[in-house]
Amino acid sequence: MESFCLLSIACCRLSFTFAAMPPLYWEVILFYAFCAVTAIQVFYYLFFFARVAFLKPKKKLQSQQHPVSVVICARDEDENLARNLPGVLVQQYPSTFEVVVVNDNSVDDSKYILQELKKTFKSLNVVELTQEAKLISGKKYPLSVGIREAEHEVLLLTDADCVPASEHWIQKMQDGYDKSTEVVLGYGAYHKKKGLLNKLIRFETFHTALQYLSYALAGVPYMGVGRNLSYRKDLFIRHKGFASINHIPSGDDDLFVNKVASGKNTAVVIDPDAITRSIPKTTWKGWLRQKSRHYTTAKYYKPKHKFLLGLYFATQFIYYPLLAATALLYDWRFALGVFGVRFILQAVILGKSMKKMGEKDLWPWFVLLDMWMLLYYIIFAPALWRSPKHEW
């Protein structure tokens, strides 16, 4: 109680001191605040994001070709299966691989398309589900069934609306494994289309991937995306699959990785041939609904991940308002000088990262797209507290 009183007195004195400060002092504090926020942002770029920009894959003296099971879950995806599944089935892989497609209670023509593809591709293994899983929503149950049916230890996951960027996707993702690796994170991108919405979707996807890939390279992996993710079947079994997160509608990819991944068992593959691409949303409403659903799982991340992500998002959110306030109220020359440090780092690190991840056409727009993230956070912040909807 005594320490609390002393702290209260100190806070009061500090308040009176700030109240008595002339206006110039407040302007100086504003400038120092901008410098501090910039320093935090610079730290993230240098300590985390630069790891992706300057990543040089280690050359393996020996490359073991593990048999791979590609697992895809689909519900009413007949058009996507017809369009994208052949790109998975024709992969050039020296060792054995199979493609397990779980057709989850589809009422369209998915069953017949899969039957026709199976006549041509013997590596295709189709699992038909005709009953819904009680109390388990989302993809967790069909994905668990697909993993159970998989014949091989190394699992490679993607979605029905995704297509590999090359015929060497399996090969490149499998190369991420060594004796200690149990999880391999890849990049799931979107096709390039015309229009502003497409640029915003692709930049947000790139920005998210830049974070989870760089965090993994720094030894603190926190998520992966089901469009391009690999892990060992034994890892899934040891952790009892999705049992601990079955009550959460989504999270079959990011929450599972958040639970099982560590700095010692996780690897990253960043290669143009190892990317998967899917068709982005074409309407603002569809995209907003999709992203809102994705962000409902972030509150279940481990505390250290929430702290690191929260600090970055918070400083990025207030960066441009502080820049404008410092330029107007303090001295625009000092504001511009501090801004220039972060700008140069962004230009170099984002440019190199976008080139590696097949998004280099976004680079000329990176400042405007970075400013857009301020509005983006305002739009999607409520999703962090909203209860997720029970959807597939």
Image (tube, rainbow, N blue to C red):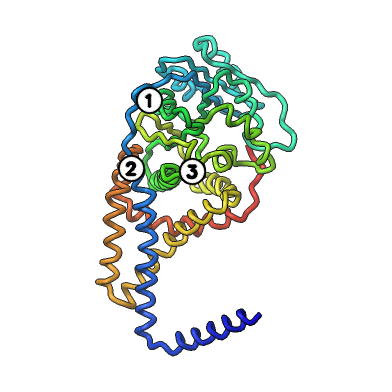
Q: Residue 230: percent from the left, percent from the top?
A: 50, 30
- Which mark is first along the chain, 2 or 3? 3
Q: Which residue is mark 1?
A: 166
According to the image, label 2 marks what residue? 354
Provide the residue designation for mark 3.
Answer: 221
Q: From this view, report whether residue 320 is shown above or below residue 298.
A: below
Inspect this view and state whether residue 300 appears.
yes
Spatial separation of the CA atoms under disc 1 and disc 3: 26 Å
Q: Quadrant of the C terminus?
A: top right
- Relative placement, left or right, of 243 versus 315 is right
Q: CA distance from mark 1 to mark 2?
A: 18 Å
Look at 44% across and 28% down and name the residue there. Answer: 178
Q: Residue furthest toward the bottom?
A: 20
User: Of the residues shown, which amino acid type is indicated by label 3?
Assistant: Pro
For the residue marked with disc 1, what is the amino acid?
Ser
SS under mark 2: helix
Give the quadrant of the N terminus. Answer: bottom right
Label located before the other in sequence (1 or 2): 1
Q: Position of residue 124 (x, y in %)?
A: 54, 16
